[in-house]
Image: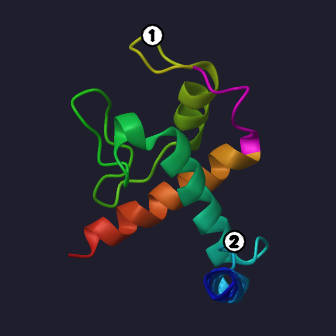
Amino acid sequence: MKVSMMRRSIGFFFCTCFLLLSGGCQTKETPLPGHRGGQLYQGKVRMDINCHGCHGWLGEGSIHAPALATDGRSISYFKFYSAVTFGRGDGMPAYQRVFSEKDIKLIIDWLQLVSVLRSVK
């Protein structure tokens, strides 16, 4: 009987600890979506999810895909929009069902920030 009571006490203790610890955990919220920093963050998130595999985490490019963020050069919105929306014949797939025009603008804004930061060395 004492062993059973001890097991229950230990089980109760661990359940209580788990609930207390998990209550303190919160999911990471997106910065204010209407705020400029929040918009840049959204561009980074979209880039991280869909583009980094070929273009790198910061748009630096790879042997499979060109750099999207280079030292201070501005990114042509129309060229970028066209390539992302309709794809290119060189392996770049079309993302017109994945990205809205707003999503593409957010990614461009993020890449322009990265480009500017790279030029300030």
Secondary structure of the residue carrying numbered label 2: loop
Residue at coordinates 27% horizontally, 75% vertically from top-left?
Answer: 120
Label 1: state its secondary structure: loop
- Start-end of magenta stretch: 94-101
Tell me where residue 3 sits by quadrant. Answer: bottom right
Q: From this view, report whether residue 78 is shown above or below residue 119.
A: above
**Relative to 96, is 44 above or below?**
below
Q: Is residue 99 magenta?
A: yes
Where in the figure is residue 7, as x and y percent of width and height? Answer: 63, 81
Quarter of the image for the N terminus: give it.
bottom right
Q: Position of residue 49 (x, y in %)?
A: 54, 45
Residue displayed at 34% across by 45% down: 56
Quick check: 2 left or right of 79? right
- Type of the residue with mark 2: Thr
Report the side of 59 relative to 106 (left or right).
left
**Of labels 2 and 1, the one closer to you:** 2
Q: Earlier in the sequence, mark 2 or mark 1?
A: 2
x, y percent for residue 23: 73, 85
Q: Which mark is residue 30?
A: 2
The 10 Å Cα crowd at callout 2, few under 14, some 14 to 19, many 20 or more, is few
Horizontally, residue 50 falls left or right of residue 73, namely: right
Q: Amino acid at mark 1?
A: Gly
Seen from the viewer's position, the closer of residues 89 and 51 is: 51
Asked if 19 appears above or below 97 in the picture, the reply is: below
Sort mark 1 into few (<14), some (14-19) or many (20+) by Cα contacts within 10 Å: few
Does 21 sit above or below residue 64? below
Q: Quadrant of residue 14?
A: bottom right
Q: Quadrant of the C terminus?
A: bottom left
Give me the disc on residue 89: 1
